[in-house]
Image: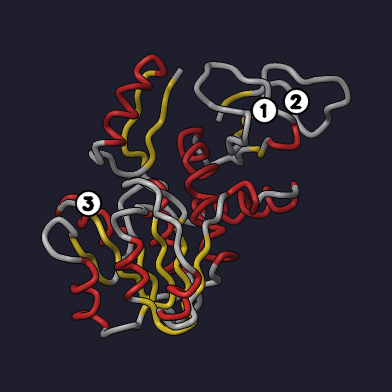
């Protein structure tokens, strides 16, 4: 997120001085104090949204938004298991899932993160460092009662996530904080109850400018209405990017991490 300094020939959608944000796309990063971004990838930041919030919403917010609206369209009556529920995507995902009427079971690594997940609206919070999340989930809602598991942890959690699903439910693996999950035989999905497995990525859900603007508008509107909060967990000087990665890999962080030029 930042301010437009100059535009190319023929660009009319934005002008110098406009506050804008973008979601990183393949070949276009954000570890810089200035960047040349295609105009069609930019979103105007509305009044009432600060730059840090806009930055958090572009990647983490849009990821959570497409997960609950498109990958598995949540509605009232659904039970959603959300791993890493105090993280940048997880905390927003919990809020959006609750706004759609779902029951949310959240997993986190510490008691402090459990508090944040509850503040986000989770109905049940499991600290996986203290108890097995699969066993705890069964105690809460019974066997095979989860409609969708949103799993950003990957290698350490996917099998247990799969075991909790009801028939024809969905396992959404959208990250691999513990390492990538191994290849899986399709028969495993049949044996689990004809369940679905998907590995989505944001950029396939931003194929058109209308999709980009629509997702951004939904998030901005929710924030301005006080219905969504993008938690900024920590900020780092751009020169300290390595420290941010170290903290992230150690799972010490919550919410969105920002690099400040």
Residue 139: x, y in percent?
Answer: 19, 80
Quarter of the figure with the N terminus: top right
Determine the residue positioned at 22% across, 66% down: 133
Q: Residue furthest left?
A: 130
Determine the residue positioned at 44% across, 84% down: 167
In the picture provided, is 38 more to the left or to the right than 200?
right
Labelled disc at residue 15: 2
Of badges 1 and 3, nearer the viewer stands: 3
In primary-sequence order, the first of circles 2 and 3 is 2
| SS for dot 3 | helix
Labelled disc at residue 113: 3
Q: Marks 1 and 3, Cα distance to the nearest angstrom?
A: 36 Å
**Cβ atoms at labels 1 and 3 below 8 Å apart:** no
Residue 43's quadrant in the figure? top right
Q: Which is more toward the observer, 233 or 107?
A: 107
Labelled disc at residue 93: none
| SS for dot 1 | loop
Residue topped by disc 1 = 18
Residue 81: x, y in percent?
Answer: 35, 68
């Amino acid at each position: 997120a930042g301010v437009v300094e100059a535009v190319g020939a023929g660009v009319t959608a934005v002008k110098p001085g406009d506050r804008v944000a973008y979601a990183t796309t393949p070949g276009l990063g954000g570890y810089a104090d200035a960047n040349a971004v295609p105009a069609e990838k930019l979103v105007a930041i509305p009044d009432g949204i600060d730059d840090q919030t806009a930055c958090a919403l572009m990647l983490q917010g849009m990821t959570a938004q497409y997960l609950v609206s498109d990958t598995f369209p949540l509605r009232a009556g659904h039970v959603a298991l959300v791993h890493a529920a105090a993280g940048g995507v997880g905390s927003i995902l919990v809020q959006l899932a609750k706004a759609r009427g779902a029951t949310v079971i959240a997993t986190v690594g510490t008691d402090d993160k459990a508090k944040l997940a509850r503040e986000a609206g989770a109905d049940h919070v499991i600290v996986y460092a203290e108890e097995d999340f699969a066993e705890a989930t069964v105690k809460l809602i019974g066997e095979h009662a989860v409609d969708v598991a949103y799993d950003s942890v990957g290698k350490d959690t996917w099998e247990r996530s799969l075991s909790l699903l009801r028939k024809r439910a969905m396992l959404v693996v959208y990250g691999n904080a513990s390492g990538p999950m191994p290849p899986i035989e399709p028969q495993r999905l049949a044996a689990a109850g004809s369940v679905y497995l998907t590995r989505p990525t944001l950029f396939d859900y931003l194929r058109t400018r209308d999709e980009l603007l629509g997702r951004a508008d939904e998030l901005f509107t929710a924030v301005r209405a006080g219905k969504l909060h993008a938690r900024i967990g920590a900020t780092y000087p751009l020169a300290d990017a390595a420290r941010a990665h170290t903290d992230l890999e150690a799972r010490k962080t919550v919410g969105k991490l920002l690099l400040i030029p």
